[in-house]
Amino acid sequence: MISHKPKKGHLLIAEPSTIGDLSFNRSVLLLADHNSEGSVGFILNKPLGYTIQDLIPEIKGNFKIYNGGPVEQDNLYFIHNIPELIPGSIEISNGIYWGGDFESTKELINKGMIRKNNIRFFLGYTGWDAQQLEDELEENSWIVTENSYQNKIIGKSSTSFWKEKIMELGGDYLIWSNAPENPSLN
């Protein structure tokens, strides 16, 4: 369902007209925080070419790392659906949590107690100053939708996620679902 007001836990779908922006072209973001001071989100469908063990060798897991956005790309962030295991987690909405005690998280991964459908790691995040996201919405840069997947979105999203969401919107968006990522290559 399309919403006009962004809220924590909503999805932001990049408008098809967002061409040439390497970070956001065909992106689907989870809005992790939204208030009068600004907004924070994580790109869900842009996997990078390495795993958590590539970045932190003492973690014995092959969880993919995703590009969370262009801000602070030298920092690791994570969302998950297991707050009962990770102390200090902050609820986003619908059973999705952000962060928590990283030492506990590393230990739980090494013990095999966290699976791929429980956690998603990101380098960087997407951030907006106060009113910036609203301005981008007025410029038709994003489509705001509810997160119908709730906490299962962690295992759901993939590189084809943008196309799936655009097809769900239907109407004039259907033509964009099969368009090349760079229309000048058509």
Image: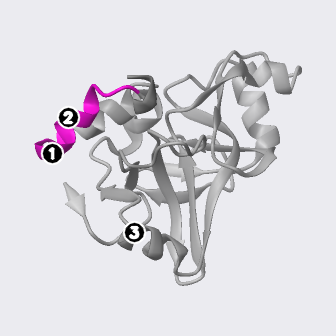
Pinpoint residue 68: horizontal percent, then vertical percent: 63, 44
Q: CA distance from mark 2 to mark 3?
A: 21 Å
- N-term mark: 3 or 1: 3
Amino acid type, label 3: Glu
Determine which residue is flagged by label 3. Answer: 139
Q: Quadrant of the C terminus?
A: top left
Determine which residue is flagged by label 1. Answer: 172
Q: CA distance from mark 2 to mark 1?
A: 6 Å
Residue drawn at x 40%, y 54% is 12
Pinpoint residue 120: horizontal percent, then vertical percent: 59, 34
Side of 130 relative to 185 (left or right): right
Displayed quadrant of residue 121: top right
Q: Are marks 2 and 1 in contact (CB under 8 Å)?
A: yes
Secondary structure found at label 2: helix
Q: 133 above or below 107?
A: below
For label 3, count other residues whose C-alpha is less than 10 Å away and answer few (under 14), some (14-19) or many (20+).
few
Pinpoint residue 49: horizontal percent, then vertical percent: 69, 19
- Residue that extends furthest to the left in the rendered view of this protein: 171
Secondary structure found at label 3: loop
Amino acid type, label 2: Ile
Q: Quadrant of the N terminus?
A: bottom left
**Would you say residue 70 sits in the magenta stretch?**
no
Q: Which residues are magenta?
A: 168-180
Determine which residue is flagged by label 2. Answer: 175
Residue 44 appears in the rendering: yes
Displayed quadrant of residue 123: top right
- N-term mark: 2 or 3: 3
